[in-house]
Image: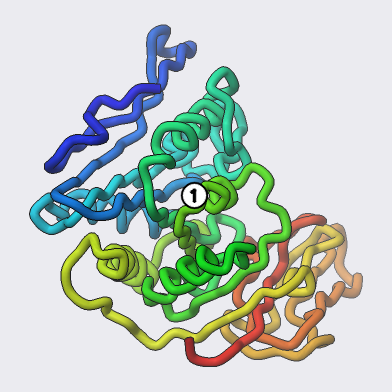
């Protein structure tokens, strides 16, 4: 993979990360991943990514907007913008790549001799990530989940890095701010960034295969807030009221154990108690069969739920977080 622009130059440049990919309809074709680099003077380098999963849209919208509007004179340092890091998946409106079925957020650190997804991950891991001091990776729920809009950091063993990530997540200014215990980060971009010692912020901003005006506005404001917090943009962080949420263990997650028709019993943001039914699954093979209720394992707020009407065994049905009050 090679960039078509200089990644270490001054000023503003639009280009591509170009990966050779021979296919049936283009013998000497390439995968072209849009990239924008905006640099001026001294300051940190911030990597901004969206489209890690191709069916999540708030991040790509906010980052295309930023790449269009932000000028070199506005920044102190460098901003690297990848609005759709998994471009094959993004163009196909799929979570995973239509070329190799690869999930970009399970492919790190990648393999420069592997599949297309593995090659992209390897270049980001080996060539782009070392340049960055901080990373914002936008996520939403995609087609299968819908979230309360939140920014998040992870529980990290290094107290200084943990504090830096948590403070940056709060500076993003989403309506909710989450501290997450990552149960398994195998192959995830998150883990690659954090193990490299960088400040890392991620988000979940809605979902259900679409982008709402509200969540896009949160994304646009949040990315500028983060750049301001990190000293790349001048001015003050535009903080809004944010509630701090905690996802301390596996009891936060409820998974379906049968197939059927998903009925939500409470809405996003609603409080619930351990043992309370939060959704039910109706069998669809015939009428007259009782539904299966899914119950919360802990007290908290419903922060995510399954989005499509049909659900399969093993699908995430709901996520509950503990409300810790105003951040």
Residue 174 in the image, given as x and y percentages of width and height: 41, 76
Coloration mode: rainbow
Horizontal side, residue 99 vs residue 4: left or right:
right
Q: Residue at x 68, y 46 (%)?
A: 186
Q: Secondary structure at mark 1?
A: loop
Tell which residue pokes out farthest to the right in this image: 289
Categorize mark 1 by other alpha carbons within 10 Å: few (<14), some (14-19), many (20+).
many
* Number of marks in picture: 1
Task: Give how far across and how far down residue 205 sits, in percent.
Answer: 46, 66
At 14% from the left and 49% from the top, the residue drawn is 40
* Rendered image quadrant of residue 233: bottom left
Residue 55 drawn at (x, y percent): 49, 49
| Residue 14 locus on image (x, y percent) | 20, 37
Near-viewer residue (173 or 215)? 173
Determine the image quadrant of residue 129: top left
Q: Is residue 162 left or right of residue 242?
A: right
Camera-nearest residue between 76 and 319? 76
The answer to whether 224 is drawn above or below residue 57 in the figure is: below
* Image quarter of the N terminus: top left
Is residue 307 shown to the viewer in this render?
no
Residue lying furthest left: 73
The residue singled out by tag 1 in the image is: 55
Point 43% across, 80% down: residue = 175
> What residue sits 28% from the left and 63% below the top?
227
Q: Is residue 26 shown to the viewer in this render?
A: yes
């Amino acid at each position: 993979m090679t960039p078509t622009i200089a990644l270490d130059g001054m000023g503003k440049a639009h280009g591509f990360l170009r990966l050779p990919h021979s296919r049936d309809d283009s013998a000497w074709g390439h995968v072209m991943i849009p990239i924008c680099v905006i640099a001026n003077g001294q300051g940190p380098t911030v990597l901004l990514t969206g489209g890690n999963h191709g069916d999540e849209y708030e991040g790509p919208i906010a980052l295309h907007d930023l790449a269009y509007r932000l000028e070199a004179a506005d920044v102190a340092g460098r901003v690297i913008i990848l609005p759709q890091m998994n471009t094959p998946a993004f163009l196909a409106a799929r979570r995973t790549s239509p070329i190799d079925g690869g999930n970009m957020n399970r492919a790190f650190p990648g393999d420069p001799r592997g599949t297309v997804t593995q090659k992209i991950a390897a270049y980001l891991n080996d060539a782009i990530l070392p340049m960055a001091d901080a990373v914002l990776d936008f996520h939403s729920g995609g087609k299968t989940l819908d979230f309360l809009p939140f920014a998040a950091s992870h529980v990290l063993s290094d107290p200084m890095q943990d504090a830096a990530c948590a403070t940056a997540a709060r500076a993003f200014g989403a309506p909710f701010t989450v501290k997450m215990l990552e149960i398994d980060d195998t192959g995830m971009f998150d883990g690659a960034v954090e193990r490299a010692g960088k400040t890392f912020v991620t988000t979940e901003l809605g979902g259900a295969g679409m982008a709402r005006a509200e969540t896009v506005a949160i994304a646009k404001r949040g990315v500028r807030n983060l750049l301001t917090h990190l000293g790349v943009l001048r001015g003050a962080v535009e903080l809004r009221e944010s509630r701090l949420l905690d996802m301390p263990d596996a009891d936060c997650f409820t998974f379906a154990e049968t197939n059927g028709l998903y009925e939500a019993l409470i809405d996003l943001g609603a409080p619930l108690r351990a043992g309370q039914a939060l959704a039910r699954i109706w069998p669809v093979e015939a009428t007259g069969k009782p539904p299966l209720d899914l119950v919360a394992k802990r007290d908290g707020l419903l922060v995510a739920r399954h989005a499509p009407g049909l659900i399969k065994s093993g699908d995430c049905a709901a996520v509950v977080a503990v409300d810790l009050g105003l951040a």
